[in-house]
Amino acid sequence: MVLLANTLLLQKNYFTFAKEYESDENGENKLILYLYMKSYKTLLFALAAIVMQFAVACNNDEPQPTPQPEPPTPELPQPLTESHTLTIFMQGNNGLAEFMDSNLQRILTSYYDMPEGDFRIFILYDRGNYTRLTELYMNDGMAKQRLVEEYDTSISTVDKEFVRGVLAQVKQEAPADSYGLILSSHGGGWVPSDLYDVYLLGEGTRSDAPQAQPLFYAQDDYDCMEVADLVDALSDTHYEYIIFDACFMGNAEALYDLRNSADYIVASAAEVLGAGFPYETMIPMLFEYDDHNLKAICEEYMDYYKESSGTVALVDCKQLEPLAEAMRTVMAEIGEVDVDSVQAYDAFEYHLFFDLMHYVELGTENCSAFEKALNDAVLYSGHTNYIETATGKDVETYTLDRSCGLSCYIPQKDCPATEAAWRKTAWAMAITE
């Protein structure tokens, strides 16, 4: 009714009416109305007004969408103001000493670029010919190391009680509001060291090839530290982050074991080249903001290796249990998967490390819920297009078409011992039982 009245008013205002009478064929008079436009410009105004009236009427008749709330603005990292103690384990009595010598110098160089703050840095370095715990400090404008303690070289630095004791000593020397940890050595993820030897050395033993690239985490001469022992050694302190400068630590099985040890973990699903992380830039970054620049450190790592070989991920540990729950759902319906078609991160004849997301995609059609859980857990993932590996008969390069950031093991009928070991992991029990 309002629309009709307004339209008639517009007609009255913008048009002139005239009337005449005509006789039709029967001789009767008929009223003829003529409509004259007052002006062309006036017509345009009239038509526009009528269109607007119809638009308003239609809009008033249709239900209006409920306004959606604005998504919450992510909290920006704040400058690090609390006290923070970083411990760096460098276990190099395994063929890595030359690389670690270089990394130690890079760490000392980084100390000149440290931001202002309440921080302490300790380094446990097992070089083989000595084992020392030192603290970095500045003296007359020079970055130096203060000897905290020197240990007998006969002590295994991968013994869990030794590691626990060193960490306790650091806390006693430098109690802080928060703690971080960098672990540098060989690595082999979830795989037990004796089983890894079979893959790496065939039927030989580690003493037959003591400088061979191994393991789990970590290696001191012939001794190795299994992931379960590492978890135990770290149990007295919760870390804001753990950075693994070690091969193959970015697998779902190992990280699930470590899910209560830290808030975040940075690790590689593949091998880490001997030069390790870019320490000269990474160390100062850890002390700038309260998020410790972990994503930016991953980006720095990928930029460092962009012309060679590298893959790295930042994992939110509190999302690993939801990830396991999502994987459990997948495992209940997953079909048979040709393991040769799944992206692998090693060159063993029978692979130990497969891309987790690729496995799920090939095994089930509906993987959207799992993909969401994976995206919640993996906050950053980067990889080069090619990866160098020493897990084959020789050092070789293979194509890395994809990487979700995490690897996993896929049971294979030709490897019953490996499957049996895998089924004992907490991850396997969480997703299959």
Image (cartoon, rainbow, N blue to C red):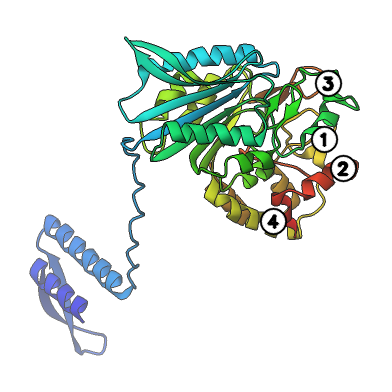
Gap in Å between the C-alphas at discs 2 and 3? 22 Å
Q: Amino acid at mark 1?
A: Leu
Sequence-wise first label, 2 or 4: 2
- Quick check: marks 1 and 2 in contact, CB under 8 Å? yes
Determine the residue positioned at 54% across, 46% down.
317
Residue linked to disc 3: 207
Q: Quadrant of the N terminus?
A: bottom left
- Asked whether, in this view, residue 214 is left or right of residue 57, the answer is right
Amino acid at dot 2: Ala
Disc 4 residue type (three-letter): Ala
Label 1: state its secondary structure: helix
Between the residue at mark 4 and the residue at mark 1, the CA separation in whole angstroms equals 22 Å
Mark 3 or 4, nearer chain start: 3
The residue under the point 79% across, 39% down is 341
CA separation in Å, label 1 and label 2: 8 Å
Query: What residue does disc 2 label?
Result: 417
- Quadrant position of the C terminus in the picture: bottom right
